[in-house]
Amino acid sequence: GQQVQQSPASLVLQEGENAELQCNFSTSLNSMQWFYQRPEGSLVSLFYNPSGTKQSGRLTSTTVIKERRSSLHISSSQITDSGTYLCAMERIYQLIWGSGTKLIIKP
Amino acid sequence: GGIITQTPKFLIGQEGQKLTLKCQQNFNHDTMYWYRQDSGKGLRLIYYSITENDLQKGDLSEGYDASREKKSSFSLTVTSAQKNEMAVFLCASSRDRVNYAEQFFGPGTRLTVL
């Protein structure tokens, strides 16, 4: 089965609403990473988050290694937040990827 | 800081053709990776390399060759392009430290096979 489960697969919100994205891992992990993929395909690293909570502007990532889960919270969403958010768990020299959450923010 | 460049940005090939994609990084990272992404799906690892002249197969290595001629460059060859194949190929790099392996990505090469 799939080792990294992301939910929801897609999410449509009004501008200003908050978004909550989840990743669950079926096996133990060393650490994990959150990425934003722009509509044209380029990937931007958002968080490298072995454990605990990290915040960058309106984005907050919380990873609980023991429970094999991580979340990404986007507060006061903006239209420019639209795109695909991917999580990946780290094995030695490899990232195992989720299928992504497609986020659409409407005006 | 640093940057990863991939060439070409768009690649159009014919069925059966051998196609080469190139990647350069100036982070001075030891480890480099090639991933394939199909539309609406996550990334799948094709090859990675932990140092110059090293090659390690990922889950999707069949149908591909790779070459790490020097630390800063990593190329990928599609040995025989498949008709109607469309995918994005992403190159990445990371430090050679097991406890800190954050990966940084290039902009991608979009492949279309006619």
Image (cartoon, coloured by chain):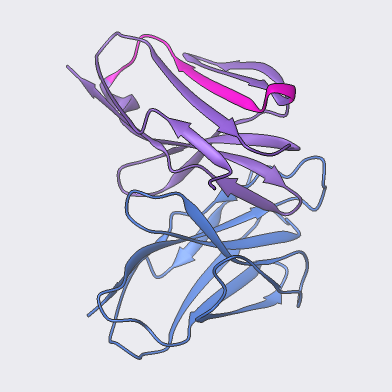
Q: Is residue B14 above or below residue A7?
A: below
- The image shows residue B85 at horizontal and vertical percentages of 30, 73
Q: Is residue B72 above or below residue B27?
A: below
Residue at x 39%, y 70% (from the top left corner): B8
Q: Is residue A5 magenta?
A: no
Q: Could you say which is closer to the camera, residue A94 or residue B93?
A: A94
Q: Is residue B15 left or right of residue A26?
A: left
Q: Is residue A2 above or below residue B74?
A: above
In the displayed image of the protein, which residue is found farthest to the left?
A107
- For residue B51, what is the image quadrant? bottom right
- The image shows residue A14 at horizontal and vertical percentages of 22, 13
Q: Is residue A20 left or right of residue B104?
A: left
Q: Which residues are magenta?
A: A66-78
Chain coloured blue: B
Question: What shade does chain A have?
Answer: purple
Q: Could you say which is closer to the camera, residue A8 or residue B45?
A: A8
Residue at x 30%, y 26% (from the top left corner): A80
- The image shows residue A98 at horizontal and vertical percentages of 50, 42
Q: Is residue B95 above or below residue B17?
A: above
Q: Is residue A106 left or right of residue B64?
A: left
- Quadrant containing the C terminus of chain A in the rendered view: top left
Q: Is residue A77 magenta?
A: yes
Q: Is residue B59 left or right of residue B8?
A: right
